[in-house]
Image (tube, helix red, strand yellow):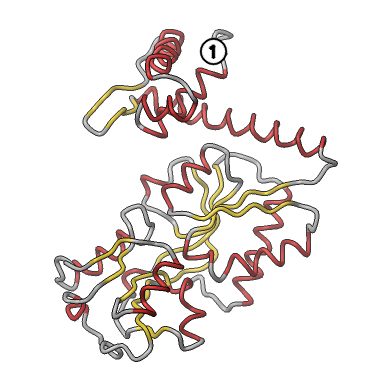
Amino acid sequence: MDRRIKLRHIEAFAEIARHKSLKGAGEALGLTQPAISKILKELEDILGASLMSRGRGGVELSAEGAVFLKGAEASLSALRQGFDGVTRLKAGGAGALSVGAMPSVAARVLPLASLKFREKEPETVLKVEDGPHSFLMERLRAGALDLVVGRMGPPATMTGISFTQLYSEQVAFVVRTGHPLCGERRLAALRDQLVIYPTERAAIRPLVDRLFIAEGVAELPHGIESVSGDYGRGLTRASEAVWIISQSVVAGDIASGLLEQLPIETGITAGPVGVMTRAEEDVSPSAQLFRAGLSEAVSELGLSAL
């Protein structure tokens, strides 16, 4: 490796790629845009290749940039693990595990898996962070998370990520108990309803879009985009809204009678839910135990991989 490449080069490059913006990267690192631009130019001069170009959508990686990004993210992840290890030793040896949770697992599978993990490693500090698929993938690649649990995303979002399936689930259309549409099977009946629709960054969004297209429903004029469980639950129970969300998020609400699932056929939205880690990276013992806890939770809840 060229000794002229410093940590500032790798950090700046990775942040520019993540934000797709020199300005955004500068703000994240506490640097001015000219300073970030200078660091990028230094790195490109050292490598003898153009790593990025500016386009309408912001900064775009070149072929060389895409190759270098993989190594840069792996290097930063390894450094963070090293720093975390030293910090844990100074604190008395207590370990930590950072887990990303998508909405599809945060409400049902992850709580049970967390309890099972705590039984095996009570001293390990478990850090759970929730969010949409694209956000958590960025955090995972950057080394801020050890693993992510949730729906598999489109192929373009899974580059450099290893996926192990736990089970498969579909999307549900839910309403408050006693809603006028209870028993409704037609998607077309939702055209005049307030609908809580998954955001563009949500893993289930392409599947839901495909379902509506297949049923000939072009648009929902009264849609609100959100993947927040608390928001969706609160608005659905207090109004005539129809909530489109992964089944696991609302399984408890349906079982308790607080919400009711519409009998709309959603087989086309079925997709794998599993564990995502950085590819070609050894999984820590704590992460292995957490994955075991997830498998136990899935089995106990009777979730199917089919």
Q: Position of residue 34 (x, y in %)?
A: 38, 14
Q: Position of residue 163 (x, y in %)?
A: 51, 52
Is disc 1 placed on a helix, strand or loop? Answer: loop
Residue in the picture at 51% in, 42% down: 139
In the depicted structure, whether residue 135 falls above or below residue 172: above
Number of numbered discs present?
A: 1
Q: Amino acid at mark 1?
A: Ile
Residue in the picture at 25% in, 63% down: 209
* Horizontal relation, residue 171 to residue 276: left or right: left
Occupied quadrant, residue 174: bottom left
Q: Residues within 10 Å of mark 1 (few under 14, many from 20)?
A: few
Q: Quadrant of the N terminus?
A: top right
* Horizontal relation, residue 87 to residue 74: left or right: right
Q: Along the line of sight, which residue is nearer the eye, 191 or 52?
A: 191
- Residue of label 1: 5
Q: Position of residue 246 (x, y in %)?
A: 41, 69
* Horizontal relation, residue 45 to residue 198: left or right: right
Q: Along the line of sight, which residue is nearer the eye, 11 or 71?
A: 11
In the depicted structure, whether residue 185 falls above or below residue 212: below
Occupied quadrant, residue 302: bottom right
Residue closest to the far front: 238
In the depicted structure, whether residue 41 falls above or below residue 266: above
Q: Position of residue 43 (x, y in %)?
A: 45, 13
In the depicted structure, whether residue 238 falls above or below residue 182: above
Residue closest to the far right: 92
